[in-house]
Amino acid sequence: MAGENTKHAHAAGLSAHRRDGSPAEAETMSVAPGTASAGPDRVADPALVSPRRAAPIAARDLLAAAPRRRDSDWDARPCTREDDLGWAAKRAAVTIAAAMLRACDGDTGTHCDDVVHLCDLIAEELGVYGNDRAELLAAAQLHDIGKVGIASDVLNKRGPLDDYEWSLIRQHTVVGERIIRSVPQLEEVGRLVRHSHERWDGGGYPDRLSAQQIPLASRIVLCADSFHAIRSDRPYRRGRSAEAALQEIACAAGSQLDSAIVDALVSAAERLRTTVRSGAAGLTTTLRSRRLVELLV
Ligand SMILES: [Fe+2]
Protein backbone atom coordinates (compact mmCIF):
# COMPACT_ATOMS: atom_id res chain seq x y z
CA MET A 1 0.00 0.00 0.00
CA ALA A 2 2.89 2.32 0.71
CA GLY A 3 4.04 1.90 -2.90
CA GLU A 4 0.53 2.64 -4.12
CA ASN A 5 0.40 5.79 -2.03
CA THR A 6 3.71 6.94 -3.47
CA LYS A 7 2.44 6.32 -6.98
CA HIS A 8 -0.73 8.29 -6.35
CA ALA A 9 1.22 11.09 -4.75
CA HIS A 10 3.37 11.31 -7.89
CA ALA A 11 0.33 11.26 -10.06
CA ALA A 12 -1.38 14.02 -8.17
CA GLY A 13 1.82 16.04 -8.00
CA LEU A 14 2.55 15.75 -11.72
CA SER A 15 -1.00 16.69 -12.52
CA ALA A 16 -0.67 19.82 -10.40
CA HIS A 17 2.65 20.65 -12.07
CA ARG A 18 1.20 20.23 -15.56
CA ARG A 19 -1.51 22.67 -14.72
CA ASP A 20 0.20 25.38 -12.79
CA GLY A 21 3.92 25.03 -12.20
CA SER A 22 6.48 24.09 -9.62
CA PRO A 23 4.82 22.40 -6.60
CA ALA A 24 4.66 19.09 -8.40
CA GLU A 25 8.32 19.25 -9.39
CA ALA A 26 9.30 20.01 -5.87
CA GLU A 27 7.33 17.03 -4.64
CA THR A 28 8.83 14.71 -7.27
CA MET A 29 12.36 15.92 -6.58
CA SER A 30 11.97 15.21 -2.87
CA VAL A 31 12.11 11.45 -3.47
CA ALA A 32 15.52 10.28 -2.29
CA PRO A 33 17.79 8.21 -4.55
CA GLY A 34 17.58 4.53 -3.76
CA THR A 35 13.92 4.55 -2.74
CA ALA A 36 11.36 2.53 -4.68
CA SER A 37 10.31 5.58 -6.69
CA ALA A 38 13.76 6.60 -7.86
CA GLY A 39 14.53 5.55 -11.45
CA PRO A 40 17.70 3.55 -12.28
CA ASP A 41 19.30 6.49 -14.11
CA ARG A 42 18.54 8.95 -11.33
CA VAL A 43 21.39 11.34 -10.62
CA ALA A 44 22.49 10.56 -7.06
CA ASP A 45 24.48 13.68 -6.21
CA PRO A 46 22.05 16.43 -5.22
CA ALA A 47 24.67 19.00 -6.22
CA LEU A 48 24.45 17.86 -9.82
CA VAL A 49 20.67 18.02 -9.95
CA SER A 50 19.11 21.21 -11.11
CA PRO A 51 16.35 22.21 -8.72
CA ARG A 52 14.03 22.64 -11.73
CA ARG A 53 14.78 19.23 -13.28
CA ALA A 54 12.32 16.44 -12.54
CA ALA A 55 13.28 12.83 -11.97
CA PRO A 56 12.47 10.30 -14.67
CA ILE A 57 8.82 9.36 -14.39
CA ALA A 58 7.43 5.94 -15.16
CA ALA A 59 5.07 5.80 -18.13
CA ARG A 60 2.30 4.44 -15.93
CA ASP A 61 2.60 7.51 -13.72
CA LEU A 62 2.35 9.78 -16.72
CA LEU A 63 -0.81 8.00 -17.77
CA ALA A 64 -2.23 8.17 -14.29
CA ALA A 65 -1.37 11.85 -14.09
CA ALA A 66 -2.91 12.82 -17.43
CA PRO A 67 -6.06 14.79 -16.78
CA ARG A 68 -9.12 12.88 -17.90
CA ARG A 69 -10.54 14.22 -21.11
CA ARG A 70 -14.03 15.62 -20.85
CA ASP A 71 -16.25 15.73 -23.91
CA SER A 72 -16.34 19.49 -23.61
CA ASP A 73 -12.55 19.56 -24.19
CA TRP A 74 -13.12 18.25 -27.70
CA ASP A 75 -15.95 20.68 -28.34
CA ALA A 76 -13.48 23.51 -28.00
CA ARG A 77 -10.80 22.01 -30.25
CA PRO A 78 -12.31 21.62 -33.72
CA CYS A 79 -12.87 24.80 -35.64
CA THR A 80 -16.10 26.56 -34.96
CA ARG A 81 -18.51 28.04 -37.43
CA GLU A 82 -16.95 31.46 -36.85
CA ASP A 83 -13.42 30.31 -37.76
CA ASP A 84 -12.37 31.61 -41.13
CA LEU A 85 -11.09 28.54 -42.93
CA GLY A 86 -9.63 28.91 -46.40
CA TRP A 87 -9.69 26.05 -48.87
CA ALA A 88 -6.21 24.96 -47.79
CA ALA A 89 -7.56 24.10 -44.33
CA LYS A 90 -10.72 22.55 -45.74
CA ARG A 91 -8.67 20.47 -48.14
CA ALA A 92 -6.53 19.31 -45.23
CA ALA A 93 -9.64 18.12 -43.38
CA VAL A 94 -10.89 16.35 -46.52
CA THR A 95 -7.48 14.74 -47.09
CA ILE A 96 -7.32 13.36 -43.56
CA ALA A 97 -10.84 11.94 -43.79
CA ALA A 98 -10.05 10.39 -47.19
CA ALA A 99 -6.84 8.85 -45.82
CA MET A 100 -8.83 7.39 -42.93
CA LEU A 101 -11.33 5.85 -45.34
CA ARG A 102 -8.47 4.46 -47.44
CA ALA A 103 -6.95 2.90 -44.33
CA CYS A 104 -10.29 1.32 -43.34
CA ASP A 105 -11.19 0.10 -46.82
CA GLY A 106 -8.61 0.40 -49.58
CA ASP A 107 -11.04 -0.48 -52.38
CA THR A 108 -13.52 2.20 -51.38
CA GLY A 109 -10.65 4.68 -51.07
CA THR A 110 -9.49 3.92 -54.61
CA HIS A 111 -13.08 4.11 -55.85
CA CYS A 112 -13.45 7.59 -54.31
CA ASP A 113 -10.18 8.75 -55.93
CA ASP A 114 -11.50 7.62 -59.31
CA VAL A 115 -14.86 9.29 -58.74
CA VAL A 116 -12.96 12.54 -58.05
CA HIS A 117 -11.18 12.25 -61.44
CA LEU A 118 -14.45 11.54 -63.25
CA CYS A 119 -16.26 14.40 -61.51
CA ASP A 120 -13.41 16.74 -62.39
CA LEU A 121 -13.73 15.75 -66.04
CA ILE A 122 -17.51 16.23 -66.05
CA ALA A 123 -17.13 19.59 -64.28
CA GLU A 124 -14.69 20.70 -66.95
CA GLU A 125 -17.14 19.66 -69.64
CA LEU A 126 -20.02 21.52 -67.94
CA GLY A 127 -17.96 24.60 -67.09
CA VAL A 128 -18.16 24.25 -63.30
CA TYR A 129 -15.33 26.25 -61.74
CA GLY A 130 -14.22 28.01 -58.55
CA ASN A 131 -15.81 27.24 -55.21
CA ASP A 132 -18.50 25.05 -56.81
CA ARG A 133 -15.78 22.88 -58.36
CA ALA A 134 -13.86 22.66 -55.06
CA GLU A 135 -17.01 21.63 -53.17
CA LEU A 136 -17.90 19.10 -55.87
CA LEU A 137 -14.48 17.46 -55.67
CA ALA A 138 -14.55 17.39 -51.87
CA ALA A 139 -17.99 15.75 -51.99
CA ALA A 140 -16.75 13.24 -54.58
CA GLN A 141 -13.79 12.38 -52.34
CA LEU A 142 -15.97 11.87 -49.28
CA HIS A 143 -19.22 10.59 -50.79
CA ASP A 144 -18.69 7.12 -49.27
CA ILE A 145 -17.16 8.19 -45.95
CA GLY A 146 -20.35 7.06 -44.17
CA LYS A 147 -19.53 3.47 -45.11
CA VAL A 148 -16.99 3.35 -42.29
CA GLY A 149 -19.97 2.73 -40.04
CA ILE A 150 -21.33 -0.23 -42.01
CA ALA A 151 -20.21 -3.80 -41.25
CA SER A 152 -17.91 -5.13 -43.97
CA ASP A 153 -19.88 -8.39 -44.27
CA VAL A 154 -22.87 -6.31 -45.38
CA LEU A 155 -20.83 -4.03 -47.66
CA ASN A 156 -19.05 -6.93 -49.37
CA LYS A 157 -21.86 -9.48 -49.31
CA ARG A 158 -21.81 -11.72 -52.36
CA GLY A 159 -25.51 -12.51 -52.50
CA PRO A 160 -28.50 -10.16 -52.64
CA LEU A 161 -29.09 -7.89 -49.65
CA ASP A 162 -32.21 -8.25 -47.54
CA ASP A 163 -34.40 -5.28 -46.57
CA TYR A 164 -32.57 -4.66 -43.31
CA GLU A 165 -29.15 -4.73 -44.99
CA TRP A 166 -30.39 -2.30 -47.63
CA SER A 167 -31.62 0.02 -44.90
CA LEU A 168 -28.10 -0.03 -43.42
CA ILE A 169 -26.51 0.73 -46.79
CA ARG A 170 -28.93 3.59 -47.37
CA GLN A 171 -27.86 5.25 -44.15
CA HIS A 172 -24.34 5.84 -45.41
CA THR A 173 -25.08 9.21 -47.02
CA VAL A 174 -26.69 10.54 -43.83
CA VAL A 175 -23.86 9.20 -41.68
CA GLY A 176 -21.39 10.73 -44.13
CA GLU A 177 -23.09 14.11 -43.89
CA ARG A 178 -22.92 13.94 -40.10
CA ILE A 179 -19.20 13.13 -40.16
CA ILE A 180 -18.38 15.91 -42.61
CA ARG A 181 -20.44 18.52 -40.78
CA SER A 182 -18.24 18.04 -37.73
CA VAL A 183 -16.20 20.70 -39.55
CA PRO A 184 -18.89 23.38 -39.79
CA GLN A 185 -17.19 25.04 -42.77
CA LEU A 186 -17.78 21.85 -44.76
CA GLU A 187 -21.54 21.98 -44.19
CA GLU A 188 -22.24 22.42 -47.90
CA VAL A 189 -19.99 19.47 -48.76
CA GLY A 190 -21.96 17.43 -46.22
CA ARG A 191 -25.21 18.45 -47.90
CA LEU A 192 -23.85 17.40 -51.30
CA VAL A 193 -22.88 14.00 -49.87
CA ARG A 194 -26.29 13.57 -48.25
CA HIS A 195 -27.96 13.94 -51.65
CA SER A 196 -25.42 11.95 -53.68
CA HIS A 197 -27.86 9.04 -54.06
CA GLU A 198 -30.98 11.01 -54.97
CA ARG A 199 -32.24 9.93 -58.38
CA TRP A 200 -33.40 12.32 -61.10
CA ASP A 201 -36.87 10.65 -61.07
CA GLY A 202 -37.23 10.98 -57.29
CA GLY A 203 -36.66 7.31 -56.53
CA GLY A 204 -33.40 7.76 -54.63
CA TYR A 205 -32.58 8.40 -50.98
CA PRO A 206 -32.58 9.74 -48.29
CA ASP A 207 -35.00 12.60 -49.06
CA ARG A 208 -36.46 11.47 -52.41
CA LEU A 209 -35.54 14.74 -54.08
CA SER A 210 -35.93 14.88 -57.84
CA ALA A 211 -34.57 16.74 -60.86
CA GLN A 212 -33.37 20.28 -60.10
CA GLN A 213 -34.14 19.87 -56.39
CA ILE A 214 -30.99 17.76 -56.24
CA PRO A 215 -27.83 19.89 -56.03
CA LEU A 216 -25.90 19.85 -59.32
CA ALA A 217 -22.75 18.52 -57.64
CA SER A 218 -24.69 15.61 -56.10
CA ARG A 219 -26.06 14.74 -59.56
CA ILE A 220 -22.52 14.77 -60.98
CA VAL A 221 -21.26 12.54 -58.16
CA LEU A 222 -24.06 10.02 -58.75
CA CYS A 223 -23.29 9.84 -62.47
CA ALA A 224 -19.54 9.32 -61.87
CA ASP A 225 -20.24 6.88 -59.02
CA SER A 226 -22.65 4.81 -61.15
CA PHE A 227 -20.25 4.69 -64.09
CA HIS A 228 -17.39 3.59 -61.84
CA ALA A 229 -19.54 0.94 -60.15
CA ILE A 230 -20.41 -0.58 -63.54
CA ARG A 231 -16.72 -0.56 -64.57
CA SER A 232 -15.56 -2.23 -61.34
CA ASP A 233 -15.32 -5.92 -60.51
CA ARG A 234 -17.69 -7.10 -57.82
CA PRO A 235 -17.57 -10.34 -55.83
CA TYR A 236 -20.49 -11.58 -57.96
CA ARG A 237 -19.59 -10.20 -61.43
CA ARG A 238 -16.80 -8.79 -63.59
CA GLY A 239 -16.62 -5.08 -64.31
CA ARG A 240 -17.87 -4.08 -67.75
CA SER A 241 -15.85 -2.41 -70.52
CA ALA A 242 -15.76 1.38 -70.85
CA GLU A 243 -18.00 1.28 -73.87
CA ALA A 244 -20.56 -1.03 -72.25
CA ALA A 245 -20.53 1.07 -69.05
CA LEU A 246 -21.16 4.27 -71.02
CA GLN A 247 -24.04 2.60 -72.84
CA GLU A 248 -25.53 1.45 -69.55
CA ILE A 249 -25.19 4.95 -68.11
CA ALA A 250 -26.87 6.38 -71.21
CA CYS A 251 -29.83 4.05 -70.60
CA ALA A 252 -30.29 5.56 -67.13
CA ALA A 253 -30.36 9.15 -68.43
CA GLY A 254 -33.64 10.83 -67.59
CA SER A 255 -34.62 8.19 -65.03
CA GLN A 256 -31.87 7.70 -62.46
CA LEU A 257 -29.47 10.26 -63.88
CA ASP A 258 -29.55 13.81 -65.21
CA SER A 259 -29.34 13.58 -69.04
CA ALA A 260 -27.17 16.70 -69.31
CA ILE A 261 -24.57 15.16 -67.02
CA VAL A 262 -24.63 11.82 -68.81
CA ASP A 263 -24.15 13.69 -72.12
CA ALA A 264 -21.20 15.54 -70.60
CA LEU A 265 -19.54 12.28 -69.51
CA VAL A 266 -20.16 10.61 -72.88
CA SER A 267 -18.79 13.52 -74.90
CA ALA A 268 -15.77 13.92 -72.59
CA ALA A 269 -15.05 10.20 -73.04
CA GLU A 270 -15.35 10.50 -76.82
CA ARG A 271 -12.95 13.41 -76.87
CA LEU A 272 -10.50 11.53 -74.67
CA ARG A 273 -10.60 8.54 -77.02
CA THR A 274 -10.00 10.75 -80.03
CA THR A 275 -7.05 12.33 -78.29
CA VAL A 276 -5.57 8.97 -77.30
CA ARG A 277 -5.99 7.61 -80.85
CA SER A 278 -4.27 10.69 -82.24
CA GLY A 279 -1.31 9.86 -79.99
CA ALA A 280 -1.16 13.34 -78.45
CA ALA A 281 2.07 13.72 -76.52
CA GLY A 282 1.91 14.24 -72.79
CA LEU A 283 -1.67 13.03 -72.39
CA THR A 284 -0.88 10.45 -69.74
CA THR A 285 1.67 12.35 -67.73
CA THR A 286 -0.58 13.01 -64.76
CA LEU A 287 -2.22 10.50 -62.45
CA ARG A 288 -5.61 11.94 -63.31
CA SER A 289 -5.05 11.54 -67.06
CA ARG A 290 -3.74 8.00 -66.69
CA ARG A 291 -6.69 6.89 -64.59
CA LEU A 292 -9.21 8.59 -66.88
CA VAL A 293 -7.72 6.85 -69.91
CA GLU A 294 -7.87 3.50 -68.08
CA LEU A 295 -11.49 4.08 -67.09
CA LEU A 296 -12.93 5.68 -70.22
CA VAL A 297 -10.93 4.48 -73.22
FE1 LIG B 1 -19.50 5.44 -54.29
Image: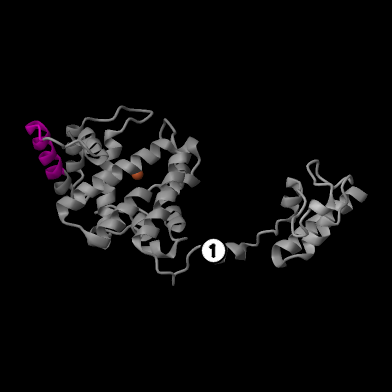
Placement of 283 over or under 121, stated as above or below = above
Looking at the magenta stretch, what is its main secondary structure? Answer: helix
Placement of 280 over or under 148, stated as above or below = above
Quadrant in the picture for the C terminus: top left
- In front: 110, or 86? 86
Query: Which residue corresponds to mark 1?
Result: 77
Q: Is residue 204 visible?
A: no
Q: Position of residue 46 (x, y in %)?
A: 84, 53
Q: Is residue 110 visible?
A: yes
Q: Position of residue 186 (x, y in %)?
A: 39, 61
Total labels: the figure holds 1
In the shown orientation, is residue 43 left or right of residue 154? right
- In front: 296, or 79? 79
Q: Is residue 107 magenta?
A: no
Q: Residue furthest right?
A: 2
Placement of 78 over or under 269, stated as above or below = below
In the shown orientation, is residue 32 left or right of residue 156? right
Magenta residue span: 266-280
